[in-house]
Image: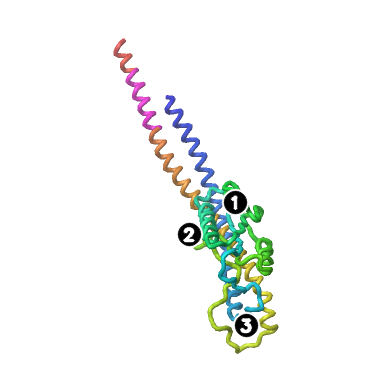
């Protein structure tokens, strides 16, 4: 009955694993709901900011604001890439996809002659690039599942200062865009310089108090910080969606494995009982 005892041990082990993956699935589902609410709340504000900037924008005003400065098309520039990943795994290919997107962006920039400073958020991204020997300009592992506007400010404030001082020509953010719980594709978005909106400028049928220049001087840094904050909350929501999907698949696979193991155990047990009955019958006949 050694095989039967071995199968019982495997069944117990798989049952324990399924309990863990089922619990993690439930936790990820709970966190996903809160993260999704933050994404839904952040998007209208970002759209409103973009609309106001679009209404105020004119080429004449743009020349006065460094955050709107479009870099000249030249080689030998410098760019910063801010990669947003997670601290934990067990989320399928979530972190791998983000890292692959960041590596592709870095490769494209470096082929164009641009020097790239990589800023990594999340232990998974930090561990990967340290393993590959890539130097990191900065790292953060303390943001967690509930990013705040203050976190976004801390991440991008120094980058904005470097851009204004012309030490950087562009700033990119690589994050997971949250379309749904099962669709979180990695995207690379340029947040600096702020892309000029389409159109010929605002319709002059209203009065601005204070002036458009004063309003833009406040809104442009806020717009950049909000873009990073939105990337943070979408990445967290994408992580929880990916983890829920991965844990659900693991739970389903554990259930399928249990069915196979239990059938195998029952057959082995039936074969053992049949063999014991045959031995008893044979012994009785011999007597």
In this rendering, which labeled residue sits more in front, label 2 or label 3? 3
Tell me which segment is drawn in magenta. 265-279
161 to the left or right of 76: right
Q: Residue 92 location in percent, x, y?
A: 50, 50
Q: Quadrant of the C terminus?
A: top left
The tag earlier along the polypeptide, 2 or 1, is: 1
In the picture of the structure, the residue carrying the numbered disc 3 is 60
Asked which secondary structure carries label 2, the reply is loop
In the picture of the structure, the residue carrying the numbered disc 2 is 183
Q: Residue 98 location in percent, x, y?
A: 53, 56
Q: Quadrant of the N terminus?
A: top left
Q: Is residue 195 visible?
A: yes
200 to the left or right of 65: left
Q: Could you tell me which residue is drawn at 62 percent across and 57 percent down? A: 119
The tag earlier along the polypeptide, 2 or 3, is: 3
Q: Main secondary structure of the magenta part?
A: helix
- Sort mark 1 into few (<14), some (14-19) or many (20+) by Cα contacts within 10 Å: few
């Amino acid at each position: 009955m050694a095989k039967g005892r071995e199968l019982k041990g495997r069944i117990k082990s798989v049952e324990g694993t399924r309990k863990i993956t089922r619990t993690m699935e439930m936790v990820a589902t709970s966190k996903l709901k809160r993260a999704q609410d933050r994404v839904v709340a952040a998007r209208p504000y970002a759209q409103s900011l973009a609309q106001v900037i679009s209404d105020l924008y004119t080429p004449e005003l743009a020349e006065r604001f460094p955050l709107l400065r479009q870099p000249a098309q030249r080689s030998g520039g410098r760019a910063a890439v801010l990669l947003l990943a997670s601290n934990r795994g067990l989320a399928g290919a979530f972190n791998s996809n983000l890292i692959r997107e960041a590596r592709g962006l870095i490769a494209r920039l470096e082929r164009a002659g641009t020097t790239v400073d990589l800023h990594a958020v999340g232990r998974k991204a930090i561990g990967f690039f340290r393993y590959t020997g890539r130097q990191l300009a900065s790292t953060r592992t303390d943001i967690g599942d509930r990013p705040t506007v203050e976190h976004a400010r801390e991440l991008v404030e120094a980058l904005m200062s470097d851009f204004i001082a012309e030490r950087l020509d562009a700033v990119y953010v690589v994050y997971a865009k949250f379309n749904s719980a099962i669709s979180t594709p990695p995207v690379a978005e340029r947040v600096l310089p702020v892309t000029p909106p389409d159109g010929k400028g605002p319709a002059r049928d209203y009065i601005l108090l204070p002036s458009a220049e004063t309003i833009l001087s406040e809104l442009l840094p806020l717009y950049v910080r909000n873009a990073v904050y939105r990337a943070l909350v979408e990445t967290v929501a994408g992580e929880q969606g990916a983890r829920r999907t991965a844990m659900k698949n693991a739970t389903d696979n554990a259930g399928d494995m249990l069915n196979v193991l239990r059938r195998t155990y029952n057959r082995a047990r039936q074969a053992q009982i049949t063999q014991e009955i045959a031995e008893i019958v044979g012994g009785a006949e011999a007597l």
